[in-house]
Amino acid sequence: MERSELPAWFVAKRGRPPLQVGRWVPLALVSPPVLVLLAIVVYPTVWMFYHSLQDTNLMRLFQENWSYVGFANFGTVFGSDRFWNAAGQMLQYLLFGACLQVLLGTVLALALYELVRNNVARTALLVLLVLPMMLPPSIVGVLWKFLLTPSNGAINQALLNLGVIDEHIEWFNRGLALWSIIIADIWNWTALPLLIVFSGRVSLPPAVFEAARVDGAGNWQVMRRLTLPMLKEIIAIAFIIRFMDAFKFVDLVFVMTSGGPAQSSELPAYIAYQRGVREFEIGEAAAYSLIIFVCSAVIITLFLQYLKRVVKAQGIA
């Protein structure tokens, strides 16, 4: 751009320095997102920590002042059989729900990329596989609750007609309630890691794979020695996202079983909801929430450290 085309206020006149950006301008540009972050992340976290140390009960909101109880709420939580039962079920959900979603999504993504060569067919299959993720979890819960209804649910009827079972399965009894929720969640959210891994596979340079095939590498060798190692960071990111969602998993539990029967499908986040929203024990609910927050932060930090080591080993950083 010629000097004559610049705005008059931008061109330095004789004896006057050109327009300079003050030091406050970058701060002013950064401050709005920082303030939003403080409002939606930092403040609720501080509020949660504060009330986890208080005997806060909304039923006594106008009767007495809340009192400081220190770590008594945490003692109540850790001393409760209900918490340890939910923690064990949370571990079961992480291993057989979240992990299986990522593994199944990875297999489907690679199969879709490697086996379906027609772009139209690949796109159509991808859309079909992603459709369950587009449904709200509450709708998914209602749908699977009807499918798994013991008396006339579609799953039982199909198994009976195929001769797989002789009588109806009680999908929501103590032994199967959590597994029913896990099945519904796998159906609902496997598409997310599928999309993540598929996008990562598409972004890999094809020249590397062509060179490997020229050198005589077979499909399994290419998959084991090239594709999977190059997708390690992508798969780890899929694990991080699903684990973050898993720790705040409430909706399907609420819709399908309400934590029952006999607390056999309760998870820590659902207990926090029950204690806070239904029973008004804000202090104890905050303690549950803080424990969930710390556990998820620890696991995510471990995944991030793993990502850092992988990236460093590959010489990217």
Image (tube, helix red, strand yellow):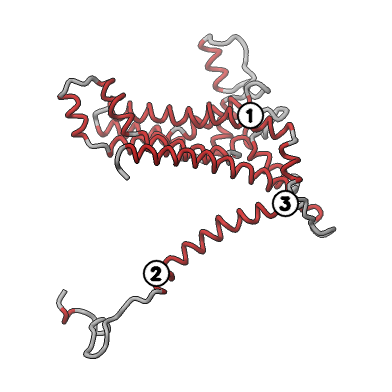
**Image quadrant in which you'd find residue 84:** top right
Q: Which residue is mark 1?
A: 88
Of 155 and 67, nearer the camera is 67
Q: Tell me the amino acid under the disc marked 2.
A: Pro
Note whether 164 is above or below 309 in the view shown.
Answer: above
Query: What's the distance in space between the residues labelled 2 and 3, CA to CA?
Result: 38 Å
Q: Indicate the secondary structure of the residue bearing disc 1.
A: helix
Q: Position of residue 307 (x, y in %)?
A: 40, 39
CA neighbours of label 1 inside 10 A, class few (<14), some (14 to 19), many (20+): some
Of 180 and 68, nearer the camera is 68
* For residue 84, side relative to residue 249 (left or right): right
Q: Residue at point 56% right, 13% down?
A: 160
* For residue 73, side relative to residue 146 (left or right): right
**Image quadrant in which you'd find residue 182:** top right
Q: Which residue is mark 3?
A: 53
Q: Which residue is mark 2?
A: 26
Query: What's the distance in space between the residues labelled 2 and 1, CA to CA?
Result: 48 Å
- Of callouts 2 and 1, which one flags the residue occurring earlier in the amino acid sequence? 2
Q: Tell me the amino acid under the disc marked 1.
A: Gly
- Of callouts 2 and 3, which one flags the residue occurring earlier in the amino acid sequence? 2
Q: Position of residue 204 (x, y in %)?
A: 26, 37
- Of callouts 1 and 3, which one flags the residue occurring earlier in the amino acid sequence? 3
Query: What's the distance in space between the residues labelled 1 and 3, CA to CA?
Result: 25 Å
Q: Tell me the amino acid under the disc marked 3.
A: Leu
Q: Are marks 2 and 1 in contact (CB under 8 Å)?
A: no
